[in-house]
Image (cartoon, helix red, strand yellow):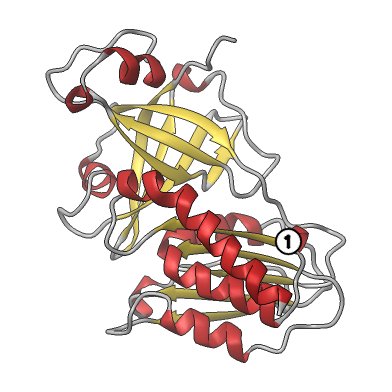
Amino acid sequence: MARPEPHRAKVQRTERIGPHMIRVVFGGAGLSRFAAGEYTDHYVKLAFPLPGVTYPLPLDLEQVRRDMPPESWPTTRTYTVRAWDADKGELTIDFVEHGTRGLAGPWAAAAQPGDDLLIFGPGGGYAPDPAAAWHLFVGDESALPAIAASLERTPTGVPVHVFVEVGGSDEEIPLDAPPGAIITWLHRGQHQVGKLAVRAVAALDLPSGTGQAFVHGEANMVKQLRRILRVERGLAPRQLSISGYWRLGADEDGWQESKGEWNRNVEAEERVALAR
């Protein structure tokens, strides 16, 4: 089976929407095959080729990893599709940036119109269920683009609770939520990532009926929230979109390597807890 070719996207414009958030809008003929819209958590893989390395074209990451030494492999990073405008052919991605740390953040900070990037995808699997009796959204900065996109498609007339943990008040951004949605910004300050989000959800009285929860962000935070929602509150797996986007102390390569085993361990602990 032929593998999908990457999309070669060109930077159209950039905008700093917060002290640590940069919005990059991509376009160009290389996005002519791109399609998104079914899900609100669509994600793409961004491939950053190493300087001075010649890659076979079209770029096939599996072929590169099979035929080239590891030190020459492009670096990939996973990002949420904040918006896709099919009429304009424009793809919007929000990048979290903390100075010179990491790869994608500094790239976004330095990006100029005309710069290009190889993009694989999109994937995805979640959208707000119009039949749900209520909606819960929880995440940190990494989940903020998906939460924002999801709120724009959340039905009106049902309870909506949103908890977003960020560094401080200056990192809050406008959210287009349905009327009546209760949005709580949790300012982390010197607290460990996820501590305030876990505390907030533990104190929340969930509305009645069969609802839906979207919980993403740092893996240790997600693990604790999963236990609260699955074990303590009794939510069924079908009611949850829940996953660790990253893990404290690991870069994306390390997290992706260990994510499968991490998830299996979390599920095993959950089975034991549910059986008690």
Query: Looking at numbered disc 1 in the image, what kind of residue is underneath it?
Result: Pro
Left or right, residue 58 beside residue 162: left
Position of the N terminus, as image quadrant, is top right
- Rendering quarter of residue 33: top right
Element class at badge 1 = helix
Question: Badge 1: few (under 14), some or many (20 or more) residues near its Cα, within 10 Å?
Answer: few
Say which of 270 and 239 sits in front: 270
Residue at left 43%, top 59%? 142
Q: Residue at 49% of width from left, 60% of height from top?
A: 143
Residue drawn at x 21%, y 47% is 106
Q: Percent x, y for residue 69? A: 21, 20
Could you say which is closer to the camera, residue 91 or residue 252? Answer: 252
Q: Which residue is mark 1?
A: 237
* Foreground pick, 216 / 38: 216
Q: Quadrant of the C terminus?
A: bottom right
- Direction from residue 50 to residue 275 in the image, left or right: right
Task: Using the rendered view, name the quadrant where residue 116 is placed.
Answer: top left
Residue drawn where x is 64% and y is 71% of the image: 272
Q: Is residue 68 left or right of residue 131?
A: left
Asked if residue 161 shows in the view, the reply is no
Q: Is residue 51 visible?
A: yes
Give the x, y percent position of residue 231.
Answer: 68, 77
Total labels: the figure holds 1
Give above or below for 220 relative to 2.
below
Q: Position of residue 3 (x, y in %)?
A: 53, 15
Instruction: Estimate the x, y position of residue 56 in percent, counting from the top left.
Output: 31, 8
